[in-house]
Image: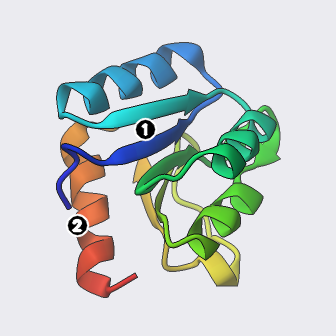
Amino acid sequence: MSIAGRKFLLVEDEPVIGFALEDMMIAEGADTQFASSLDEGLSLADAHEFDAAVLDVNLHGRESYPLARKLREKGVDVVFATGYGVEPLPSDLAEVETVAKPYSVESIRAAFARLQQAGT
């Protein structure tokens, strides 16, 4: 999946990591919206249309799964990011790709490419 020209929702509760992710995606030509909490991410998902999203799994002790479900219902490609290692996901989100922190734009691009190959 090409990142350039696509609109991404980025949700990360650690500001340094979030701003670095946003900078990486902008450098690749993405249009981004950034949220630092689950509630902010849910609000953005209601207010805007996105092509794809990178969601931190743990947002201030809350899982981003409700946001992932909402986005997927709208046809948005979702990739999870985590610094806690890859843990089993809920069964309805088991096919969502996960990248481990620290991640690179290459790992994010590869995760979205795997989603495209799987047809999700």
* Label 2 packing within 10 angstroms: few (<14), some (14-19), many (20+): some
Could you tell me residue 74's position as x and y percent? 58, 70
Could you tell me residue 105's position as x and y percent? 23, 39
Residue at screen point 47% across, 52% down: 50
Give the answer, above or below, for where 32 lies relative to 23. Answer: below
User: Which sits in the foreground, 66 or 90?
Assistant: 66
Tag on residue 101?
Answer: 1
Query: Of tags 1 and 2, which is closer to the observer?
Result: 2
Tag on residue 79?
Answer: none
Give the answer, above or below, for where 16 lies relative to 12. Answer: above
Locate the C terminus by quadrant.
bottom left
Q: Is residue 102 visible?
A: no
Locate the N terminus by quadrant.
bottom left
Q: Amino acid at mark 2?
A: Ala
Q: Quadrant of residue 113?
A: bottom left
The kind of secondary structure element at disc 1 is loop
User: Which sits in the foreground, 6 or 88?
Assistant: 6
83 lies left or right of 90: left
Residue at screen point 38% across, 45% down: 7
Could you tell me residue 92's position as x and y percent? 66, 82
Q: Quadrant of residue 119?
A: bottom left
Residue at screen point 22% across, 44% down: 5
- Cβ atoms at labels 1 and 2 below 8 Å apart: no
Q: Amino acid at mark 1?
A: Lys
Give the answer, above or below, for where 79 lies relative to 31. Answer: below
Identify the colour scheme used: rainbow
Whole-Å distance between the Cαs marked 1 and 2?
Answer: 18 Å
| Label 2 sits on residue | 113
User: Which sits in the foreground, 13 or 9?
Assistant: 9
The extreme top residue here reads 16
